[in-house]
Amino acid sequence: MSLRLDATVEERGYAVALDVADGETVAILGPNGAGKSTTLDLVAGLLRPDRGAVHLDDRELTGRDAWIAPHERRVALLAQEPLLFPHLDVLDNVAFGPRSTGTARSDARESARHWLAEVGAEDLAERTPAQLSGGQAQRVAVARALAARPRLLLLDEPMAALDVAVAPALRQTLRRVLADRSALIVTHDAMDALILADRVVVLEDGRVAEEGPATEVLTRPRSGFAARIAGLDLLRGTWDDAVRTADGTAVHGLVSGPEPATGDPVVAVFRPAAVSVFREPPGGSPRNAFAVEITDLEPHGDQIRVRAGELAADVTAYAAAELDLAPGMSVTFSVKASEVAVYRT
Amino acid sequence: MTNQRQVGVPAWIYLPALLGAVLVLLPLLGMISRVDWPSFVDLVTSDSALTALGLSLRTSAVSTLLCVLLGVPMAVVLARTSFPGQGVARSLVLLPMVLPPVVGGIALLYTFGRRGLLGQELDALGIQVAFSTIAVVLAQTFVSLPFLVVSLEGALRSAGQRYEVVAATLGASPTTVFRRVTLPLVLPGLVSGATLAFARSLGEFGATITFAGSLEGTTRTLPLYVYQLRVTDADAAVAMSLVLVVVAILVIGVARPGRVAS
């Protein structure tokens, strides 16, 4: 099943067009308020756009004169919380979809057992939702969504509420069940995008900021948000033998991909670990130097991540102590040109 | 004992709290002290007492059923939809709760009574509402409905719509969602709302006596019977009052506020 969404919601400043091809899983990334939930609501039929349409294959779900009710869309939603119906046992929760669409009780239960087995939760069938752990409940919720035989699966940060310890197992299950399904998954997590999605759409301020194959977007980000969740520093500018940023700074780096022409929009991307931090501007070295003010310090593995607005630098705890770094302090971030990748956006 | 963390309350606050509790409980003790225990069983099982009790239970059961049939849809419309004037509608639904019941009785009389708004139409159909058992049920439903609506609307709001959204995306039609998800989720709220409505119906006096009168076997419910006995047979009035107190305590057991919240 293929999805085509092209919709505007004035009140939320939302104007997005995106596609999901047959059998494709698309991850939607973006900061809070970027329009990720709005996208799911539009597809599920929980929200009417001011303009635009939603098509699933040739069927117009939402349009100028078309409106298919949520329960007739065959679009199942898996939310951040499992939301298993507390008054039904696990088996009847999973059988809910088939039962609702007119399948006889015994057939629905048989189908429920099949889908529970599919997610490795067949031994939970007789339990009530209150007797399940968070990971088990989300596994059952996946089975319940699949049992409804949706044409498109919507996943709204399905791993966000889980313990770090149980998320990987569920991620593997999702990877298996999403393999040849059409699905749209909202996530904050680069790993979810890389493992589960074929393609990534980054939303910022209700617009598509960039899209492309997951590995491409996360290794060569063109939007600030994609760079942030990939853990990379990104500076935007125009090309004149260097990346000229809006404040006039020139960032030197190695051009990857097609050679940009003067005036082309380009980005300079580098790893925070490649950035050095100085109290005094370093003199006479062939490095890129940016005068910045530290906004935040946070532990990052065995290092300290020094944030300065959009930029980040990783230094050792020893270096951070030696330099006596603190938020509000003016320092210089410096990165070798050989560590900077420059490409067109 | 619980081990909840708490800061102390001012010591003096126990005094007015205790006075309040005394104000509520002392009259009950006063009444119980006047019960004529040797003849208690005879008093509460006299023919007229049993007739009044039976009528009260039957009419209250029917009006509770009506409250559920009408009040559940009202609560759902108030909690799950939005329409112009909804705030006003919500306030008007609560009106019978704050209105003096006798005013409700007058209003019903001039609507369903013979010379009321619908009186002639009903008369033409051969239906005489006022001063009949139907009038008792109507009066009880009128005053009890808000209790069920308020209690259930609160339960619906606190349950939220998230389960209903999931159910719809699983292919459940609005009717299926209502039947298989919404109702089971708010069942505790519905039970306590219905219990409160039943209790209110059982205690209904003012609207009933105004709109239905006090005819033995037809409209003389237990509260009306007690009111009348109070002059002629104080012992019987006290005994029947005790029966009503026991019923009220049972009702509180089923519908105590803590259960509404959960």
Image (cartoon, grey):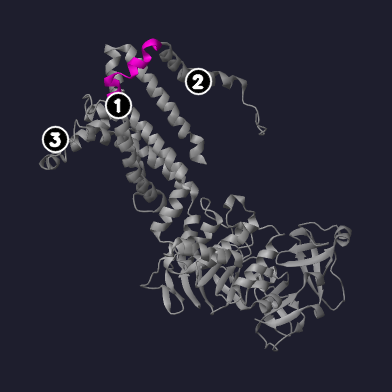
> Residue A284 falls in which quadrant of the image?
bottom right
Measuring 48% from the left and 65% from the top, which residue is drawn there? A107
Q: Secondary structure at mark 3?
A: loop
Residue type, mark 2 in image: Ala
Q: Nearer the viewer, mark 1 or mark 2?
A: 1
Residue type, mark 1 in image: Phe
Q: Secondary structure at mark 1?
A: loop
Is B251 above or below relative to A183? Answer: above
* Residue bearing the label numbered 2: B21
Image x and y of residue B231, in percent:
28, 13
* Majority SS type along the magenta span: helix
The residue segment tinted magenta is B35-51
Q: Earlier in the sequence, mark 2 or mark 3?
A: 2
* Residue bearing the label numbered 3: B114
On screen, residue A148 versus residue B175, left or right, reads: right
Specify whether residue B95 is in view.
no
Q: What's the chain of the residue with tag 1? A: B
Depth order, front residue of A204/B147: B147
Is A209 above or below relative to B3? Answer: below
Q: What's the chain of the residue with tag 2? A: B
Q: Earlier in the sequence, mark 3 or mark 1?
A: 3
Measuring 23% from the left and 26% from the top, which residue is drawn there? B217
**Extreme-front residue of the structure:** A106
